[in-house]
Amino acid sequence: MIHIFKRIGGKFSLLFFIFFSSLNSFAVEIFRFHGNIFGTTYNISVATDEELSKDTKASIIKQVNDKLKNLDTIYSTWNKDSELSKLNNYAADEWFSLSDELEKNLLESKKLSEFTDSAFDPTIGFLINTWGFGSNRNSVGNTLPNSEQVNFALGKIGFDNLEIEQGKIKKKYKEIYIDLSAIAKGASVDSISDLLSSLGYTNHLVEIGGEIRGKGNKMPELWTVAIENPIENQRSINNILRLSQDIAMATSGDYRNYKEVDNKRIMHIIDPRTGYVAEHKLASASVFAQNAMLADALATAFMVMGEEEAVDFAKKNNIAAYFIIRENADNLEFTSIYSPAAEHMFSN
């Protein structure tokens, strides 16, 4: 059974922002801090049953920031000295040594690519750059590739062109360019959540650029998040969700990253299966999963699939998801659909 809501107004925001309820909270302290990473922001809340000293708080912040900076040196495609950038610039048919973090991400990405029939495929980097949505965006401008360029780029993507063994990787073509932007934020959210748990703080909420993972609760309340109203230049709540313990969510959409070409809006969602911009009415897809990496990848895959394929895929695979579908060309009317697996989140 699919449930449908109508919503009239401006754009739905991609961003799930954190809403902190203060009612009946039994935690002695909820320690919150924030910062900047990956060209976006992060927000972290830690619920404790004891007051934290100034030194303890400073230590938590430092360890989180150190971890995030380390992850940035692995995943960034903008930093030429990052591990991923070095891999992307590496010669073909030569082994490249991988860190445990990057190897784990690539292996998981390969599984998710197979699971989604390549709707999710981070080896798409060369194709993304061909369309001018990658780190080369400023140099490409608003030009569009021709069919010859697209077909050439299609031949330089896919996990079939990579060989991954224990701790190392080999590219079939030098042009192969891996872009983990559709999974790195989610993976980083999981890493920070694991870090906080290892420090003994098992009740926390981690958000990086809109990707979220909640663990435990606020003792005894569940963590609460809100979906923004689709109104430009205004932040207001559209819907409120209480996250069950140990759940993550991520959102992907089509209207934050695009370019105008000949008075036509070209969105950044490129279909790895065709090589062309995905054209459909799906405005955004939100996924709820056991970890943020999975939610991040599936949200991206759903935006590639489009509304019909994505809804069917979510139903078939028991994935909790929330879809916002554009009903007309002026982007003022939307239909919101949640999958059966997400019914308990929206039934109230």
Image: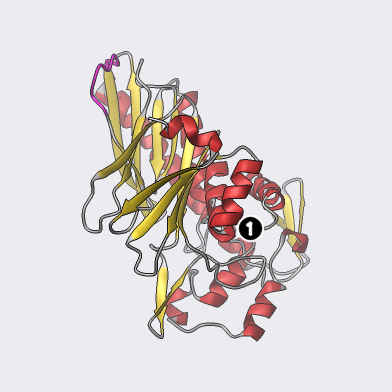
Near mark 1 (Cα within 10 A), the count class, few <14, some 14-19 or many ≥20, is: many
- Depth check: 286 or 204 in front? 286
Quarter of the image with the C terminus in it: top left
Q: Secondary structure at mark 1?
A: loop
Q: Is residue 10 visible?
A: yes
Say which residue appears at 23% left-offset and 46% top-offset: 236
Find disc 1 in the rendering and name its residue.
119
Residue 275 part of the magenta segment: no
Say which residue appears at 52% left-offset and 42% top-offset: 2
Q: Give the total of numbered labels.
A: 1
Stretch of the chain drawn in magenta:
21-28
- Depth check: 260 or 66 in front? 260
Q: Identify the image quadrant of residue 291.
A: top right
Q: Is residue 101 visible?
A: no
Q: Identify the image quadrant of residue 240.
A: top left
**Image-based side of 107 in relation to 15, left or right:** right
User: Magenta: predominant secondary structure element?
Assistant: loop
Where residue 221 appears, as percent x and y from the top left, is: 35, 19
Where residue 118 appears, as percent x and y from the top left, is: 68, 58
Quarter of the image with the N terminus in it: top right
Q: Is residue 141 above or below residue 185?
A: below
Say which residue appears at 55% left-offset and 71% top-offset: 277
Q: Amino acid at mark 1?
A: Ala
Q: Identify the image quadrant of residue 65.
A: top left
Where residue 259 appears, as percent x and y from the top left, is: 41, 74
Q: Is residue 201 above or below residue 224?
A: above
**Coloration of the structure image:** secondary structure
Where residue 160 appears, as percent x and y from the top left, is: 77, 61
**Image-based side of 11 in relation to 119, left or right:** left
Say which residue appears at 62% left-offset and 66% top-offset: 177
